Amino acid sequence: MTIYNFSAGPAVLPKAVLQQAQAEMLDWHGSGMSVMEMSHRGKEYMGIQAQAEADLRELMSIPSSYKVLFLQGGATQQFAMIPLNLLRGKLSADYVNTGEWSKKAIGEAKKFCNVNVAANNADRNCTYVPAFDSWKLDKDAAYVHYTPNETIGGVEFGWVPDTGDMPLVADMSSNILSRSVDVRKFGLIYAGAQKNIGPAGLTIVIVRDDLVGHSDPRLPTMLDYKTHAENDSMYNTPPTYGIYMAGLIFQWLKKSGGIGAMERTNITKANLLYGAIDSSNGFYVCPVNRADRSRMNVPFTLKDAALDGDFLKQAEARGLLQLKGHRSVGGMRASIYNAMPLAGVQTLVNFMSEFSRSKG
Ligand SMILES: *Cc1c(COP(=O)(O)O)cnc(C)c1O
């Protein structure tokens, strides 16, 4: 039986990439070693990391005026590193609250500065993206932070806010590489790897040069972007195996036609799943405003929560795994990241239709 893993993260990886990693596990390209065993200062590993960076730059068309950093600590550590590095003597920052991950970013930033919540969707249970003309931005803020895809609520921005000269900071943990974005519109983009890039333990930061190097001198060395920018992310030992795996994913993406091709497939997958929900006569319901529905994380409830257990059990019996929704939302959540094949969504949709008929 083919297994389809709908986990929100750590999440499914392309089978071809796992097979390649398996084939190279004991002897990487005739080196006689696993990548895990290589010195991070050796020429083999340095080549792997340089290639991963070059491929990511190519995939996302990252201008040379931006640094690409390979860090640890997860997206959660960025919640602190962003204010610590980007306040640059200012006292406040603008944050947009669209759900659970925005709230965590806001909570952490409050330790370091005044947070102006410029827009908030809590009035409708975090199920929509607040229109840009309703945002109350502060011209004295150091930057504007938002979460383009709320992994838990399933709310995704279909547009990039235009904040002019004010640096725009985006937590792209769950939708990086899933759609084209113009990096030049951002001051900083960050993402934990375990949703759409590779295994957990790697965090990617893409930061514009002029935002680096303005931190308080007492900031711990490892929390300063400058440390990592000046040392090609090798100030200390980087998460070498995670970077190698991310590099294999970048090559897989390039071979699959790049981000444009991936975005088209993601649209097809999302339309298929939302279509099944919307045409179920209320058996399945997605609470998110139609225009703001995530292409990556699809939350839905069953008309009767008493059927949840049966749904999950029958789904599992068909190889459809990890569909249980986040405890804060309930119901189901299907995460359909880049590595989820169209056949996985097709199988899910077929099952959903049979299940609703059997219980209808
Ligand atoms: C998963 C996730 C995080 C947390 O990532 P960690 O790497 O576990 O710290 C933060 N933001 C978003 C949008 C996420 O999806």
Image (tube, helix red, strand yellow):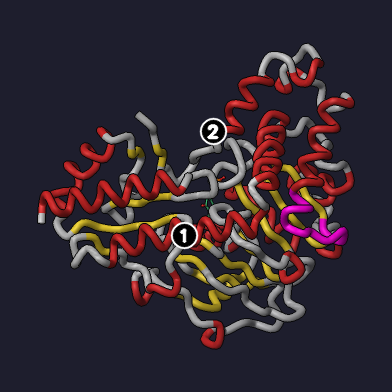
First to last magenta residue range: 56-66
Q: Which residue is mark 2?
A: 15
Cα distance in 3D space between marks 1 and 2: 20 Å
Q: Which residue occupies 71% across, 38% down?
A: 247
Residue 176, image x, y percentages: 61, 55
- On screen, residue 28 versus residue 192, left or right, reads right
Magenta stretch contains residue 62: yes
- On screen, residue 225 versus residue 12, left or right, reads right
Residue 43 shows which numbered tag?
A: none
Q: Quadrant of residue 60?
A: bottom right
Residue 268 shows which numbered tag?
A: 1
Q: Which residue occupies 55% across, 63% down?
A: 147
Q: Which residue of the protein is positioned furthest toward the top in this rendering?
A: 32
Q: Which residue of the protein is positioned furthest toward the bottom in this rendering?
A: 133
Q: Is mark 2 within 8 Å of ligand 1?
A: no
**Depicted 116 relative to depicted 284: above or below:** below
Give the amino acid at mark 2: Lys
Give the amino acid at mark 1: Thr
Q: Quadrant of residue 360?
A: bottom left
Q: What is the quadrant of the N terminus in the image?
A: top left
- On screen, residue 333 versus residue 70, left or right, reads left
Q: Quadrant of residue 111?
A: bottom right
- Whether residue 155 is visible to the viewer of this picture, yes or no, is yes
Residue 348, image x, y percentages: 32, 47
Verify CB contact (< 8 Å) between mark 1 and mark 2.
no
* Crowding at mark 2 (Cα within 10 Å: few <14, some 14-19, many 20+): few
Residue 109, image x, y percentages: 60, 61
Camera-side residue: 38 or 3?
3
Q: Which residue occupies 70% across, 41% down?
A: 251
Q: Is mark 1 within 8 Å of ligand 1?
A: no
